[in-house]
Amino acid sequence: MGSPRRILIVGNWKMNGSRQSRQELDAMAAGLDPAFSEKADMLVCPPAVLLAGFTENATGPIRFGGQDCHFNESGAHTGDISPEMLREAGAVAVILGHSERRADHGEGDAVVKAKVKSAWRAGLLPIVCVGETLAERDANEASAVVARQVRQSIPRGAEGGNLVVAYEPIWAIGTGRIPTPEDVAQVHNTIRNVLNERFGEEGEKIRILYGGSVKPDNAKTLLAIPNVDGALVGGASLKANDFLGIAHAVL
Ligand code: 13P
């Protein structure tokens, strides 16, 4: 049984890629089965400096997003990029609160919440990441941790069309380890309940992606789990063949 929501497959390139990666993108666009676009969307989130080059003259099914943004529109914030700047560079979405941002840059739920509002201000679709550590999973706290992150990182006003949540267990990122389908189902169900509780009917429309070691050989299984409405893919989004293998699992 597939998701009743429109599937979203997102590639998070992290700090990888170069201008030459355009070739990989072209191969992804050319290789994507036309039937994919009937039920799903594809987003690629490259490093911000590559965005404008990739979006210029971009045709075809792939759209683009940023990997983070500041919550202000402009100002004295050395090294930061505003959501308006991402938008001007051609982005339609932005990943926020990724565990690598939370760990490397000390971002907490309050900052992520401010960033979500700023993404809305700029007309970007925020993809808010949540997920537990291995210690929290072992202590049976995964659902409670994730529920708290969803409550505290997402502001009022979320709707099906303006928010995506991504569940990424931190211990599954880049490790090749993934939770069992039952564990994924349990956390996604928890997230759905929190969204419904807070946003009523709109909560039911918000897409919840799974991320963490998604590969062509496990994508079909993951996408068949209730309340899994797509995937947030790191390593396997860098190569056209792998990313297409994941995208074609929706067919
Ligand atoms: P991997 O797919 O490389 O495990 O990364 C997942 C991730 O962090 C995507 O945001």
Image: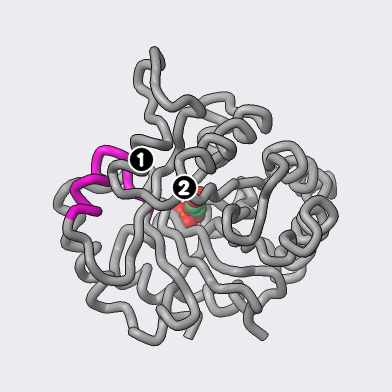
User: Mark 1–mark 2 contact, CB under 8 Å?
Assistant: yes
Counting from the top left corner in percent of width and height, residue 173 is at: 54, 50
Q: Quadrant of residue 165?
A: bottom right
Instruction: Please give the range of residues in magenta.
Output: 45-56
Q: CA distance from mark 1 to mark 2?
A: 9 Å
Q: Relative to 127, say whether 112 is above or below.
A: above
Counting from the top left corner in percent of width and height, residue 164 is at: 59, 55
Counting from the top left corner in percent of width and height, residue 87 is at: 36, 43
* Residue depicted at x 20% and y 67%: 26
Q: Quadrant of residue 224?
A: bottom right
The amino acid type, in three-letter code, at marker 2 is Leu
Q: Main secondary structure of the magenta part?
A: helix
* Residue depicted at x 74% and y 60%: 203
Q: Relative to 31, say whether 65 is above or below.
A: above
SS state under label 2: loop
Number of other residues with Cα within 10 Å of mark 1, as a class: few under 14, some 14 to 19, many 20 or more: many
The amino acid type, in three-letter code, at marker 1 is Leu
Identify which residue, 158 or 146, lies in the foreground: 158
Residue assigned mark 2? 124
Look at the image and tell me whether residue 104 can be seen.
yes
The numbered dot on residue 86 is 1
